Amino acid sequence: MEVAASCCGGVSLSQDLVRVEGKMDGAKYRQILEENLLPSARKFRTSRMFTFQHDNNPKHTAKLTTQWLKEEKVNVLMWPSQSSDLNHIENLWKDLKIADHQRSPFNVTELEQLNCKEE
């Protein structure tokens, strides 16, 4: 079984939305992966048989990130540089932004609650 999980823009789309305080960097991205990627794979009962997809954003290719992915033996989909047209997650971000704008949340807490109701 092969499942692709995506992370982008400071939010892990593996199972739960993850709120990121401050600026996203390689260290924060790695922390999100450590805390969410493998537990989400277990929730989906994929064990280690999944392929992880992210683009060539600098935080995705940071030494901290690539080292952790290697240590954890995570199969990562090879991704050509400058290929945003292939990145399906961009369409999802657009849809999410439109839906959130239509619901007009007043703050981050309301936004999180609205997105959790969608599940």
Image: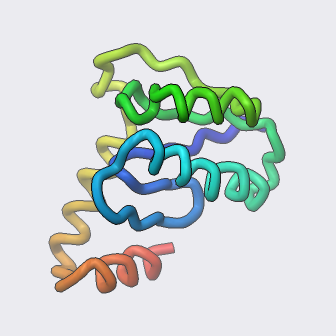
* Residue found at x 39% / y 45%: 8
Image-quadrant location for residue 82: top left
Q: Residue at x 78, y 55 (%)?
A: 42
Give the position of the N terminus as an image quadrant: top right
Judged left or right of residue 116, residue 2 is right
Give the answer, above or below, for where 116 lies relative to 74: below
| Marker count (numbered) | 0
Please tell me in which quadrant of the rendered image residue 109 appears: bottom left
Coloring scheme of the render?
rainbow
Which one is in front, 39 or 102? 39
Residue at 36%, 25% in the rendered image: 86
Relative placement, left or right, of 7 versus 70 is: left
Q: Find residue 6 and report its horizontal and vertical position in percent.
A: 50, 44
Q: Is residue 74 above or below residue 94?
A: above
The image shows residue 89, relative to residue 55, as above or below, that is: below
Q: Is residue 18 above or below residue 118?
A: above
| Residue that sits furthest to the top in the current view | 80
Given residues 27 and 49, the one toward you in this image is 27
**Residue 64, horizontal then vertical, whole percent:** 54, 33
Which one is nearer the viewer's eye here, 83 or 118?
83
Residue 87 position in % (x across, y down): 37, 32
Left or right of residue 69, residue 31 in this image:
left
x, y (%) of residue 84?
29, 27
